[in-house]
Image (cartoon, grey):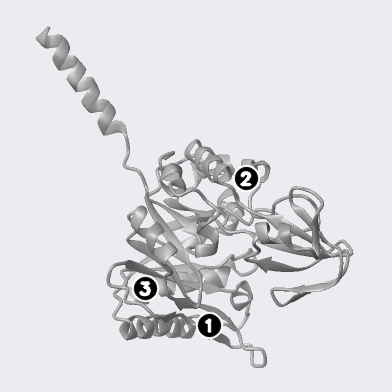
Amino acid sequence: MKKNILIAFVLLLLVSCSKTKEPIVSFYYWKTNFKLSPAEKDVLKDNNVTKLYIRYFDIGLHPKTEEPIPVSPIHFQENMSGFEVVPVIFIKNKVMLQTNLDIEDLVQKTIRLVEEINTKNKIISSEIQIDCDWTLSSKGNYLKFIEQFKKLSHKKLSATIRLHQVKYFKKTKIPNVDSGVLMYYNMGSIAPDSLNSIYSQKIAEKYLESLKKYPLHLDFALPIYSWGVHIRNQQVIGLRSKLNVSELKRDKNFKQISDIFFRAIQSNYKNGVFYEENDLLKIEAISSDDLKQMAKDLNENLAQAPNEIIFYDLDEFNIKYHEKNIFKQVVSYF
């Protein structure tokens, strides 16, 4: 009897040890002014969130000189003492396509601006993240930028990774960073068809198996945002963010003609945007079921378990369209 109890105890111990720790829940914050609403504070508290990936600024090109310049730096309106802050720098690919790019100068200016923002707001960051959808044409400059940034910043460095960069990593190469974040969204073309460009399981399936061979540790970024694709004469003329679908259904200027399409039945202005009669709005959104499916598919194709699941992005508008405990449900799949 004692022997059987001992065996059962050992088996129970082995099972419990084999269960890896669940990833933590984190969020991207992508607005230019950092100020949390009560609903945003609640979701952070409910999910024990202590780490935020905050877009500090973009790097684009000056319209006249074509010199790299910072665009729309963040302004903090709250004390950040309760959070671990990871500054995220979004670099437009056209910057990395510059043939005469002074990489060391760009790295130094980028680090300096991050430090200025941190000093002003009493933030201490141990990690910086670089967000750039580099291509075969820009990879040379991008990889050199990462090398120089890692050398001069003396901080942990992470980078965003796209699905195509995972599947074709031998061509696109792997940046010399401590870890990557797979951006598991924006998978298709923004088009007047009925497909969802934010997420498509069919498209994702073409890349998932490649995750098992990718040598860099990856965490995952999952989408919780939505938008409307504004279509005129079968041509996309813009994206319309923060469209309240319930309000759109009540709007007498629009008629719902399918699950995802609304037609303007007369010319009108809505949220400062002009819609001609017969313009279409295609609603692209992510459901809670989509998020669970993403987590399930990713978990079945892991090379190694993620440390974090980062949701894009923290905004009261995005949060209200998902059930309260969805974030905990998603991380429980891993």
Front-lying residue, 332 or 118: 332
Label 2: which secondary element: helix
**How far apart are the alpha carbons under marks 3 and 2?**
34 Å
Foreground disc of the pair 3, 2: 2
Residue under numbered circle 2: 204
User: Can residue 178 be seen in the rendering of this structure?
Assistant: no
Q: Is residue 15 above or below residue 160?
A: above
Q: Is residue 62 above or below residue 272?
A: below
Q: Position of residue 3 (x, y in %)?
A: 12, 10
Amino acid found under the numbered disc labelled 1:
Ser
Q: Position of residue 318 (x, y in %)?
A: 54, 60
Label 3: which secondary element: helix
Foreground disc of the pair 3, 1: 1
Q: Residue furthest bottom?
A: 64
Residue at 55 percent across and 83 percent down: it is 71
Q: Position of residue 133 (x, y in %)?
A: 59, 65
Residue at 43 percent across and 75 percent down: it is 34
Front-lying residue, 150 or 83: 83
Front-lying residue, 30 or 145: 30
Residue under numbered circle 1: 72
Residue 153 lies in what quarter of the image? bottom left
Q: Quadrant of the N terminus?
A: top left
Amino acid found under the numbered disc labelled 2:
Ala
Q: Tell me the crowding category of disc 3: few under 14, some 14 to 19, or many 20 or more residues within 10 angstroms, Cα based.
A: few
Q: Residue furthest top?
A: 1
Residue under numbered circle 3: 151
Residue 48 lies in what quarter of the image? bottom left
Q: Which mark is residue 326?
A: none
**How far apart are the alpha carbons under marks 2 and 1?**
32 Å
**How far apart are the alpha carbons under marks 3 and 1?**
26 Å
Q: Is residue 148 left or right of residue 258?
A: left
